[in-house]
Every structure is written in structure tokens, then in C-alpha cells.
Image: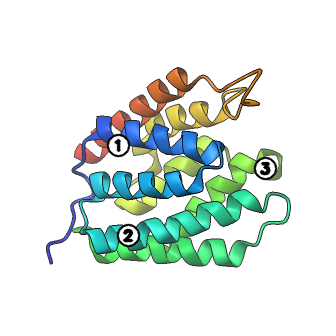
């Protein structure tokens, strides 16, 4: 089976799918999120449907478990699924990477986003570190990616209260587009 080149993807399509997935995640529409995970992974990673389904399963379980256990996190199953997720990607891409480190850094930024006062590291730095692990390069390459993504994640009402103060999805969409474009540009160098 041919290996996937992680550096080649349609950033506009990935950004749109990512924004749609965020919306489903914050609205607790986990089945819809799972279907969107399939689409985004297939679009970004170019893996066959069997591997794409396994990736969506592992990342979906990790995200759902993490989302539903706020304040009483159960890290081992979340990390176990993230490790499996990144191992599949590393095993099937043209430039393998340290999948365990990538999984740990992914969970780290989830936690920094959820509990920023517990960490000295910024969300931006953690996001950049996570991408650097996947692309075997310096976190500095992902500064703009991380900046735009962190702003989107930290918008005052990005979660909204669904009725009185809904998220500004147009602004989130624009920031995610800038973020994915920056990542795409960084990995093309």
C-alpha cells in the first residue's frame, strides 16, 4: 500500500471540515462529529477507508471521553487512543514520526486549553509543539498556525450558551482557514 504524504492536502477543504467538526463537538453531536472526522482524515491524510475508519474511531473515543469527563479526567484511555491514532498515521506516512510523543503533546494542548492556569506553557506553544512532532521539524515553523488556532479556541464565547450568546462561527471559520493555510505553507518549505 502506498504511503501518505502528510504535507500534501487541500487546506481550504480541511479548514472547512475542521470548523464543521468543532461545531459538532461543542454541540455534543458526537455521531455527526465522528462522520466529520472520517471526512477530514480522508481529505487531509489520503489513507484508505479502513485506516480512516480506525483513525476516526480512536480520535473520536479520545475526544468524547475527554469531553464528557471534565473535572474527573481519566487520562489513560484518552492517551491510549491518541497513541493508537498517531501510530496508524506514522506507520502509513512517507515521513514517520514519534507517535507516542505526538499523542502526549496532543493531550497536553487539550489540557492547557481546558486548564490554562495549571500550565506555564501557552496554548500557542503547545499547539506548535504538537505539529512539530508530527512533521519532524521545529515548533517555530508553526507559529502562525498555532496563533490563529489558539485565538479561535480562546474567543470569549467560542462555546457560547447556545441561545443568548452563540459562538461567532464566521470568525472561527476565518481563523481556522488562516491556521490551516499557515500549516500548509510551513510544511511546503
Residue at x 66%, y 31% (from the top left corner): 158
Q: Is residue 12 left or right of residue 57?
A: left
Residue at x 38%, y 58% (from the top left corner): 38
Q: Nearer the viewer, mark 2 or mark 1?
A: 2
Q: CA distance from mark 1 to mark 3?
A: 27 Å
Query: For mark 3, what is the residue?
Result: 115
Q: Nearer the viewer, mark 1 or mark 3?
A: 1
Q: Which mark is residue 14?
A: 1
Q: Is residue 81 left or right of residue 9?
A: right
Front-lying residue, 170 or 36: 36
Q: Which residue appears farthest toward the left when viewing the image?
A: 2
Residue 87 picture location, percent across and down: 41, 76
Front-lying residue, 130 or 68: 68
Residue 50 occupies which quadrant of the picture? Answer: bottom left
Query: What is the crowding at mark 3: few (fewer than 14 residues within 10 Å), some, or many (at least 20)?
Result: few
Tell me the element at label 3. Answer: loop
Query: For mark 2, what is the residue?
Result: 53
Residue 74 picture location, percent across and down: 76, 72
Q: CA distance from mark 2 to mark 1?
A: 17 Å
Numbered circles on residues, count: 3
Amino acid at each position: 500500500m502506498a504511503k501518505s504524504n502528510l504535507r500534501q492536502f487541500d487546506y481550504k477543504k480541511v479548514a472547512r471540515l475542521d470548523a464543521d467538526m468543532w461545531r459538532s463537538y461543542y454541540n455534543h453531536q458526537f455521531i455527526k462529529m465522528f462522520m466529520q472526522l472520517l471526512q477530514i482524515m480522508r481529505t487531509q491524510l489520503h489513507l484508505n477507508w479502513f485506516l480512516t475508519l480506525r483513525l476516526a474511531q480512536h480520535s473520536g473515543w479520545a475526544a468524547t471521553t475527554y469531553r464528557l469527563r471534565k473535572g474527573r479526567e481519566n487520562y489513560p484511555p484518552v492517551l491510549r487512543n491518541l497513541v493508537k491514532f498517531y501510530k496508524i498515521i506514522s506507520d502509513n506516512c512517507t515521513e514517520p514520526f514519534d507517535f507516542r510523543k505526538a499523542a502526549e503533546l496532543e493531550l497536553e494542548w487539550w489540557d492547557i486549553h481546558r486548564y490554562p492556569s495549571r500550565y506555564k506553557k501557552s496554548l500557542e506553544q503547545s499547539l506548535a509543539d504538537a505539529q512539530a512532532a508530527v512533521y519532524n521539524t521545529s515548533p517555530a515553523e508553526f507559529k502562525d498556525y498555532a496563533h490563529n488556532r489558539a485565538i479561535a479556541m480562546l474567543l470569549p464565547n467560542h462555546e457560547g450558551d447556545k441561545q443568548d450568546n452563540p459562538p461567532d462561527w464566521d470568525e472561527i471559520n476565518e481563523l481556522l482557514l488562516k491556521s490551516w493555510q499557515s500549516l500548509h505553507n510551513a510544511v511546503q518549505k
